[in-house]
Amino acid sequence: MIMPLVDMTHREEIDRIGRKARDGNALSRDEALWLLGLEERTDIFDLLTWSNRIREAHHGNRIRLCSIVNVKAGGCAEDCKFCAQSASYQTASPRYGFIDTAPVLQAAEEAAANGVASLGIVAAWKGLNEGPMLDAVCDRLQALKAQGKVAPDASLGLIADRRVAERLAEAGLKCYNHNLETSRRFFPEQCSTHGYDDRVQTIRHLKAAGIRVCSGGILGLGESREDRCDLALALRELEVDVVPVNILNPIEGTPYAQLRPLAPLEALKTIAVFRLLLPRQEILVAGGRAINLRDLQGLIFMAGASALMVGNYLTTVNRSVEEDLQMIRDLGLEPEV
Ligand code: SF4
C-alpha cells in the first residue's frame, strides 16, 4: 500500500503537493515519485484536478498545435529499439531520401490551413554536421521562413558542434526537437549507437545558439516510474521550453513489437506529474495518443497538456485534424492559431 509522505489522507497529500506546485515551488523527487505511485482511480482524478488548474494558470485556455513533415524517412544507422525507422529492424515504414523544397512548402500550406502554428522538418539519421546536408536543411528552413505560413521547426538528430546550431538559427529556426527519450539509467537499454550525453550536449548547443528546445520522451518502453520521474527532472534541470510526451506505439519488426501497452490512466497520471514538475513548460502530447488513450484522449488537457501534435506522425497515421480541433473546442479550449 502507498503511504502518504506525512500522516494525511491521499486527497490531503495530493492537495498539499498540488498547492505547492501551483504556488511556484519546485516538487521534490520524493513528492513526484509518491504521485507516480498512486494506483487508485479516485486519487488519479484528484491529481488531474491539480494538473488542470496548473495548466490553466500558466497557459490559459489555449492549446498550441504543431505538425511534422518527414523530409528523410527510414534507413537510419542508429538502433533505437522503439523506432520503426532504424535500418537495424525490418519494418513496413517508408524509406526515402531527402525531399525537395516543394513538398515541404506544400506540407506547410496544409498545416497553416488547419490552424497549425509550427511545422517541424524531421529526418531519420544520426545527426547534422557541417556540409552539403546542413546546407540543404538551411535551404528548406529559409524557404519555409520566406513562405511565412508556419514557424519552421526541426528535429534532425544529434548536433555535436555549436556552429551547426548557429547555422540553423541563422536560417530562421526557432525551435528544435531532440528528446532525451527516458532516464539516463534506462537510456543504454534503448540505444547502443549513441549515448545519453550526446543528447544532452545537443540540447546545450541549441540553447547556446538561442534556439528554443523541445525535448521530452517516450512512455511505455518498459521503464520504471523512477525512470519517468528522472526524465522529467532532467528536463527541468536543462530548462527546456517544450516537453513532448510520446506513448509507445509498438511497431511490427522492432524489438518492442510485443511490449504491453501502457494503461491509459497510467499515461494520464504521468502527464499530470510532468505538469506539476514542469508548470511553465509547454507540454505537448505527440505520438501514440490515439492507440494508447483511445476515448480518453480529451483528458490529456486535464492532465496538463498545453499543446498537441496533429496530423500524421512519423511512421503512423493519426486521426483527422478536424476531429482534434473539435475535441479541443468541445472542452471549452481554444486552438492557438
Ligand atoms: S529515433 Fe532517430 S536516431 Fe533513433 S533510429 Fe529512429 S530516426 Fe534513427
Image (cartoon, rainbow, N blue to C red):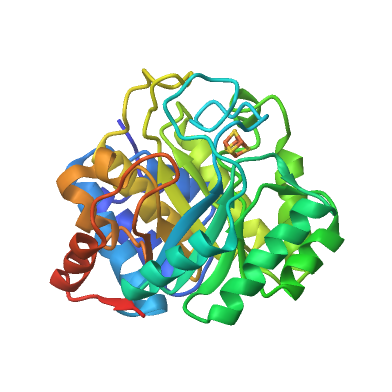
Q: Is residue 78 visible?
A: yes
Q: In the depicted view, which residue is nearer to us: 309 or 63?
A: 309
Vertical position of residue 219 compared to residue 140: above or below: above
Mark count: 0
Residue 14's spot in the image, x, y percent? 32, 56
Answer with left or right where residue 206 lies relative to residue 39.
right
Q: Is residue 296 left or right of residue 84?
A: left
- Residue lying at 18% horizontally and 49% vertically, measured from the top left: 296
**Picture residue at 76% right of the left edge, 41% below the top:** 197
Of the pair 274 and 322, the residue shown nearer to us: 322
Which residue is drawn at the image coordinates 27% and 37% (left, top)?
Answer: 39
Please identify the quadrant where the C terminus is shown: bottom left
Residue 279 showing in the rendered view: no
Q: Quadrant of the N terminus?
A: top left
Q: Nearer the viewer, residue 23 or 192?
A: 192
Instruction: Give the image quarter of residue 61.
Output: bottom left
Q: Quadrant of residue 67?
A: bottom left
Is residue 188 or residue 97 the one in the foreground?
97
Question: Image quadrant of ligand 1?
Answer: top right
Image x and y of residue 24, in percent: 49, 73
Image location of residue 257, percent across then percent down = 39, 21
Specify whether 220 is left or right of 74: left
User: Quarter-wise, where is residue 203 in the image?
Assistant: bottom right
Name the residue at 44% across, 66% down: 106
